[in-house]
Every structure is written in structure tokens, then in C-alpha cells.
Image (cartoon, helix red, strand yellow):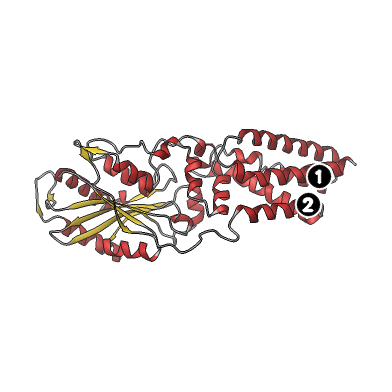
Amino acid sequence: MRSFIFSIVTVLLLFSQKGSAQTNLLLPEQTEISLLTCGSGTQLHSLFGHTALRIHNTVNGVDVVFNYGAFDFGTPNFYWKFVKGDLQYFVATGSYEEFVQQYQYENRSIYEQKLSLTLAQKQQLTANLIAVLSSNKKYYTYKFIDRNCTSMVEDLLNGVTEHKINTAVPDTQKDYRTILNSYLVNNFYEKLGINLIFGYKVDKQSDQLFLPSELMEGVAKTKNFGNPLAQETTTVFQQEATGSTASVWNNIYTFIAVMLLFAYFSNKKPVLIFYLLLMGLLGLFFALVGFYSFHEELLLNYNTLLINPLLLLVLFFQIRKNTKWLKISIYTCLALIGCYTVFILNKAHLTIMLPIILTTSFILIRLLRKEVK
């Protein structure tokens, strides 16, 4: 309710007087529009930063932020909707002061680029935002790469600027997986999960600005009627150093240790059963989630060649003491692991997957040698 009331007040105060019949409302000359870019946070949903638009109307004292990244954790079946790809995000408004306070509290950097737009462009952009805010268009279906807080703001800017936002930034020379991994240096298990669940699409070279820092760079390189679209980038708040950000457990070394323990104790039946069951069920999930989800990033997930549903057959035939089909299923899984390893030799997640490749191969070969005897 508070957000709704704030939105209504914003609409009334942003415009100082009636304008033409076409727009009905007219912005004061002094209105400033800025792109706000926020740095990474500590929560998974905040690791990649955030984008918002600030409209500062000095005549009426309005200083409002339009935020395309709002969502409701209380949504029924939140996580299933997120995985499926039909979770509704929405546009929210709030005061600039509260926005800055929130990101200072989270210790996340804030950068501002005042946009050098003509009055007509400011008028159009603000009218578009108000139209969205006052209609069902304020809700949109979130897509990790194609439709998020950054891409929605980029589309708004492209709708009013002379030229589209310049996409010639360093990230567009990389594939999506490499870009995402660069944000997860100190979050190994998040990186592992993202690289496992995302399929072939994220191996493609980036062809769009989908992260906040990319849009900030693109706007800085864009011209508007011969002049830079953005004035010099200013730092509203700089993240404060909090010492080492490396975790004592959230790193590849603890993961290697766990894999070594699985390999060492895999001659124990309970450990073998647990490992094959875990990997098989995960493989089944990765193989099927792409058919359930609307996220294109989850399609064509070749990681199922490694985290393989066929490991469930290995477990089944091992429990049933069916030596013939056990050997066939083991040889099949090893062949698929070999194909997988060759395929990802030039991929960004090779190092991340090596512990799983080596551990699973070792366990399967040990089981095979045991059955040959």
C-alpha cells in the first residue's frame, strides 16, 4: 500500500503543469534523469548487481527511483515459479534517499550517470515509465539473460535516444558463462550450481547487455545528437572493504576434499549407493527441468553426460547383481564422461567439473574392476 500511494504522489508531482494535448503533462526544464548502477551483494539474487532509473524534479522536489527488479518472496510456490520461468517481477518506485540508504546498509557500491537527454526525450521517457507504472505492464516475466532489471531499462532508453545503447563493451567479446563466472570468484558452490544447471545457451558469445555494469559501460560509450549520452560517472557510495572475502568452506578446495572422500570410501556399499543415487537423481533433474522451465538457459544441458541419469541404472544393476548389464551401463557412462570431457576442454567450467569427472570415473572403474574379478 505504501508503494502504491508513493507511486500516485510521484505521478502527480513529477509534472508541474499541463502540456500539449498529445502528452497532457509537461516536465519542468530542470528535470534530471540518471542511470543508477549498483554493485554486487552477498545474496545470490544480488551477486550480479542492479540497475535503476532516477528522476529528479528540482522544481517540485521529487526525487524518485524506478526499479524494475522488484519481486515478492511471498509469492506462492516462489522457487518453483522461479525455476519454471514464470515468476512475475514488477516495477516499483521509492525515494532516492531510501534507495541509497538501502544499498549503503547492504554495503553495495552505487554509481550514477546523469543522462544528457533533450526535454522531449525526458518527457517521453518519463511518460513511458508512468504509463507502465499505472498499467498491467508494470509486471513482467523474469528471464535471467533476456529480460531482467538491466535489459528492461535498456529497452526504455533505446526507445527515446537517437541511437541504441552501444554494445561494444568488453563483455560482448566473451561467452555468457565466462561473464557469469567472473562474478562468482568467491562463491564456488553458487558457481558450481549455475554451471551445472545452465546448458548450451550460456556458452554462446554475449550479444547483448544483460548485466548492470555492462549497461553502465554501454551508456558511457553512447552518443545522443553528437554528444555523450552520459555525463561523467559519479560514485554515490563506494563499497567499504570488509577484509578478506574468501570463504573457508565455499571454495574449490573443500569440494575437492569431499570428492576425495567419496572416492576413497566408495568401496563401502552405503557410500557407493549414496553417490550413485545422488548423481543419478541430479542428472535426472537436469535432464528434465529444461522441458518444464521456460528459461532457455536450461535447455540442451550437456552436463547430463557427466551428472548422468544412467548412474541410476548402474546402481540398479549393482544391487540386483546383474553383472552383464552392470558392465554395459558402466562402460556407457564412462564413454559419455569421455565425450563430455573432450567437449568442455575449451569451456569456462572445465576446472570446476574436473573433480566430478575424476571422482565419478574412479568410482565406476573401481566398481567395474570389482565385478570383473
Residue at the spot 81% in from the left edge and 38% down from the top edge: 327
Q: CA distance from mark 2 to mark 1?
A: 8 Å
Which corner quadrant of the image does residue 313 belong to?
top right
- Tag 2 and tag 1, C-beta contact below 8 Å: yes
- Tell me if 101 is positioned left or right of 77 in this view: left
Where disc 1 sits, the SS reads: helix
The N terminus, quarter of image = bottom left
Residue 266 at least partly seen? yes
Please state if 239 lies on the left or on the right of 199 as rendered.
Answer: left
Residue 271, x across and y down, in percent: 76, 55
Q: Is residue 140 above or below residue 1?
A: above
Q: Is residue 155 left or right of residue 331?
A: left
Residue at screen point 19% across, 36% down: 225
Instruction: Give the mark nearest the N terminus, 2 or 1.
Output: 2
According to the picture, the residue beneath numbered tag 2 turns out to be 266
Relative to 45, residue 104 above or below = below
Q: Amino acid at mark 2?
A: Ser
How far across and how far down the image is residue 60, in percent?
14, 61
Please say whether residue 155 is visible from this viewpoint.
no
Task: Compare residues 152 and 175 and report the one nearer the observer.
Answer: 175
Vertical arrangement, residue 102 with respect to residue 273, above or below? below
Amino acid at circle 1: Arg
- Residue 213 location (% of width, % of height): 38, 47
Residue 14: % across, % down: 17, 56
Height in image: 327 above or below 212? above
Q: Residue at x 46, y 37 (%)?
A: 174
The crowding category of the residue bearing disc 1, from other C-alpha atoms within 10 Å (few below 14, some 14 to 19, many at least 20), is some
Name the residue carrying label 1: 366
